[in-house]
Image (cartoon, helix red, strand yellow):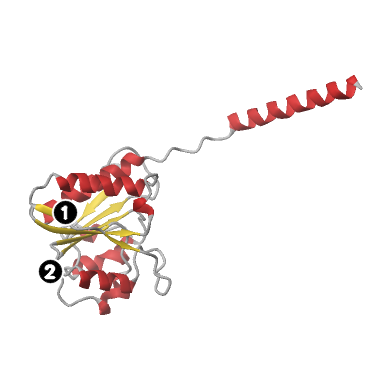
């Protein structure tokens, strides 16, 4: 009776040892670099202030519930943006516009739908700046629906880093977009802003990546 128990004990010990060895050899998942998103929020606020010369009303447009989740890096981005703008006495930050998913008109790869973009611009026509914290749809999909004259300065922070030239070149070319902050890659490449993002304006938008 004792011999089978001893064998079973040895087997259990060996299994536990193998599990522990396997875990130690498994590559560790890289920690999410939240500083990337904090620096993005900070720089986005700086660009917003610069674009409207430090005065006016700003409306931030957020996507879904991610910005309300304190564990999400997008929450860090939003908080950093708020904190930086709060230092600007001439700027008032309106309550954010939070867009839920649009089941009827989702454009793959974009943060907002065609209808949502049109409605947001109409709703906040009096704002001095409208800041989108996500990608916009391709210009070709929204151009016929956009208002003829948009007086607000439009800024976009795009973490998707895909097909930027096709998506944004005509936004700039038609005078619709003032500032685009574009990620080099969806994965962090280092600490801080300069290692992860490029700022595009009307002066350098022709160098947008394909």
Q: Residue at x 30, y 42 (%)?
A: 195
> Residue 129 is drawn in which quadrant?
bottom left
Asked if residue 167 is positioned above or below residue 143 in the image, the reply reads above
Q: CA distance from mark 2 to mark 1?
A: 15 Å
| Callout 2 touching callout 1 (CB < 8 Å) | no
Q: On the image, numbered disc 2 is attached to which residue?
A: 151
Q: Residue at x 69, y 26 (%)?
A: 17
Q: Is residue 67 left or right of residue 42?
A: right
Q: Which mark is residue 138?
A: none
Q: Residue furthest bottom?
A: 144
- The tag earlier along the polypeptide, 2 or 1, is 1
Q: Residues within 10 Å of mark 2 (few under 14, many from 20)?
A: some
Using the image as rendered, state which of residue 162 and residue 155 is in the foreground. 155
Using the image as rendered, state which of residue 110 and residue 125 is in the foreground. 125
Q: Residues within 10 Å of mark 1 (few under 14, many from 20)?
A: many
Residue 196 visible to the viewer = no
Q: Position of residue 80 (x, y in %)?
A: 25, 44
Local secondary structure at mark 1: helix
Q: Is residue 26 left or right of residue 42?
A: right
Q: Position of residue 24 (x, y in %)?
A: 59, 29
Q: Residue at x 13, y 68 (%)?
A: 126
Q: Position of residue 157 (x, y in %)?
A: 27, 55
> Residue 192 is drawn in which quadrant?
top left
Q: On the image, numbered disc 1 is attached to which residue?
A: 48
Residue 119 visible to the viewer = yes
Q: Residue furthest right?
A: 1
Number of marks in the rendered image: 2
| The C terminus, quarter of image | bottom left
Q: Is residue 195 left or right of residue 4?
A: left
Local secondary structure at mark 2: loop
Q: Residue furthest front?
A: 95
Q: Position of residue 159 (x, y in %)?
A: 34, 53
């Amino acid at each position: 009776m004792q011999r089978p128990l001893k064998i079973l004990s040895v087997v259990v010990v060996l299994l536990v040892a193998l599990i522990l060895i396997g875990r130690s050899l498994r590559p560790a998942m890289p920690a999410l670099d939240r500083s990337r998103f904090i620096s993005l929020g900070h720089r986005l606020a700086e660009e917003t202030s610069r674009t409207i010369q430090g005065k006016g009303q700003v409306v931030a447009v957020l996507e879904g519930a991610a910005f309300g989740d304190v564990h999400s890096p997008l929450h860090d981005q939003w908080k950093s943006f708020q904190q930086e703008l709060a230092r600007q006495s001439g700027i008032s930050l309106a309550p954010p516009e939070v867009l839920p998913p649009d089941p009827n008109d989702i454009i793959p790869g974009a943060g907002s739908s065609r209808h949502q973009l049109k409605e947001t611009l109409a709703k906040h026509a009096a704002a001095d700046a409208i800041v989108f914290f996500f990608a916009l749809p391709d210009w070709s999909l929204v151009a016929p629906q956009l208002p003829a004259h948009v007086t607000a300065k439009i800024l976009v922070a795009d973490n998707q880093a895909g097909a930027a030239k096709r998506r944004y070149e005509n936004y700039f070319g038609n005078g619709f977009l003032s500032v685009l902050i574009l990620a080099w890659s969806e994965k962090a490449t280092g600490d801080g802003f300069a290692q992860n993002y490029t700022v595009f304006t009307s002066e350098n938008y022709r160098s947008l990546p394909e």
